[in-house]
Amino acid sequence: MIKVLVVEDSAVIREFICQLLTSDPDISVVGEAANGEEALFLIKRKRPDVVTMDIHMPKMNGIDATRKIMEISPVPIVIVSGSTVREDVEMTFHAMEAGALAIAARPEGIDHPDHAKSTAEFIQTVKLMSEVKVIRRFPQKPVSAAREQAAQKVARSPAEIEVVAFGASTGGPLVLQTILSQLPRDLSASLLIVQHIADGFMEGFVSWLNHTSGFPTKIAADGERLLPACAYVAPNGFHMGVTPRGTISLDQNERTNEMCPSIAHLFRSVADVMGKHAIGVLLTGMGADGADELKLMRDSGSVTIAQNKESSAIFGMPGTAIQLGAAQYILPPDEIAEALIRIINHSREEKKYGGE
């Protein structure tokens, strides 16, 4: 049985969440808390496998409670939100900065046509997160140390790098924030990002990433021309690719690995169009979305990077890519950032001084 602690200040919503969770025979709700202080007390007594956490609560809010829990008794925490207002969604990502593992939309009410679907997705998220071995947020090395280690591991690219394609799922937001915050604002390449995230949370995620990383980040638009030193995030419900004209292509015609947007679609498009002028980066996440296509990128001449196991919340996607021989480099987030800077800068120097 999966032991769940439900933390929610509204008695009505708390009862609703408990009923949904206990409808699954594999789940047992071992405790209910109306605020963060009660949650801290019950964590020690009940030893849950996973916690569902509200954000707005009296006495101690969900962000502070998450931070305290991760300090005293680390456990997988799923932030449950019933709001898709951008400011509220940004707060949920601040909870992820404090140590929460995932964000889940609160299921729709019983009379709603999407009740069954949203409930199934919610329960699946809780069950999957309960299996994750919680790691403390990876320690960042001093920039000088990360730069030195990346320099020892990473070779120069023979071609100018124009695009860096990222794929991420569970645990990805914090990793992307870490990488983007270390990139220079005059980077000569464009960044394309597919981040698996629940419907309704994308706008808040992009706003949070833009503000906290300091790197210009926006939701991609169909036909938009790629600009250097800008990160474009695929919107929910659309696959993202690139065109030979240097523009973004969005479409809904394909369901790849049942994900939309899919990392596979992005990597395949970049491999076809950009080849050796691209870098592919596969980060933490469940499943195998993008693993085969990272190998396709490598075979097309792209530089390829996978996040290492020690820093991954879930090693599914990068682990599969590594097993396939798709990754040239296997690095933690801070070294990924330094590797990107080194490869992109060297490729630009090669072109400036007579290389390709």
Image (cartoon, rainbow, N blue to C red):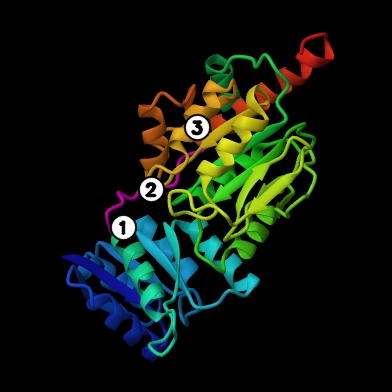
Based on the picture, tell me whether residue 195 belongs to the magenta stretch.
no
Start-end of magenta stretch:
129-142
Label 2 is placed on what type of residue?
Met
| Left or right placement of residue 345 versus residue 141 in this view | right
Please give the name of the residue rendered at 54% of the width and 51% of the height, measured from the top-left corner.
195
The numbered dot on residue 286 is: 2
Disc nearer the start of the sequence (2/1): 1
Total residue callouts: 3
Q: Position of residue 87 (x, y in %)?
A: 64, 71
Q: Nearer the viewer, residue 336 or 149?
A: 336
Q: Which residue is mark 3?
A: 294
**Quadrant where the image shows the C terminus:** top right
| Left or right placement of residue 352 versus residue 310 in this view | right
Say what secondary structure mark 2 lies in: loop
Q: Which residue is mark 1?
A: 128
Label 3 is placed on what type of residue?
Leu
Say what secondary structure mark 1 lies in: helix
Q: CA distance from mark 3 to mark 2?
A: 16 Å
Contact? badges 2 and 1 (CB < 8 Å): yes
Q: Position of residue 251 (x, y in %)?
A: 63, 54
Q: Position of residue 103 (x, y in %)?
A: 46, 64
